[in-house]
Amino acid sequence: MLETLDIASPACRLIINADDLGACSERDAGILELFSRGAITSASLLVNGPSAVEAAASASAASLPLGLHLNLSEGRLANRCSLTDANGKLLGKLGLRRALAAGSAR
């Protein structure tokens, strides 16, 4: 007896991710509101952003799924490295490009 399996097409899911949670309290509030309204499904946390700690706590309380936003060009880092100036400030997009081109980024 020949049997035929009815295989459904794969389910599709649209993910709408909000960028830069943690950049500032106004942006954070907007992202959290969009999530509460079902307009976005996740956000990326700018971990060295000025409001990152508060934003992460708010996202956790709201059950907002988070990813990490890799930031190599803007803001400050806790520790100096080859991508920062003497004060720990990242070099900016142009400065990062220059450091990469010069081979000085480790």
Image (spheres, helix red, strand yellow):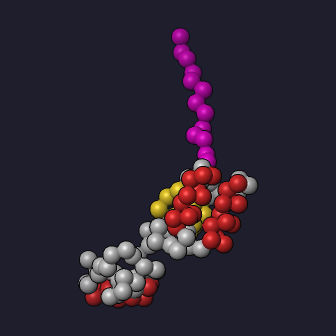
**Residue at left 40%, top 82%?**
90
**Residue at left 44%, top 68%?**
70
**Residue at left 57%, top 24%?**
5
* 10 on left or right of 40: left
Tell me the chief SS of the magenta region.
loop
Quarter assignment of residue 101: bottom left
Quarter the C terminus occupies: bottom left
Residue 23 screen position, x and y as percent: 56, 73
* 49 on left or right of 96: right
Quarter assignment of residue 79: bottom left
Query: In this rendering, does residue 72 appear at all?
Result: yes
Q: How many dots with numbers?
A: 0
Residue 21 screen position, x and y as percent: 57, 66
Please tell me whether residue 61 belongs to the stretch shown in magenta.
no
Q: Residue furthest top?
A: 1
Residue 48 screen position, x and y as percent: 46, 71
Where 57 sits versus 13, above or below? below
> Which portion, as a residue range, is magenta?
1-15
Where 89 sits versus 22, above or below? below
Residue 102 screen position, x and y as percent: 28, 88
Of residues 75 and 3, the one nearer the viewer is 75
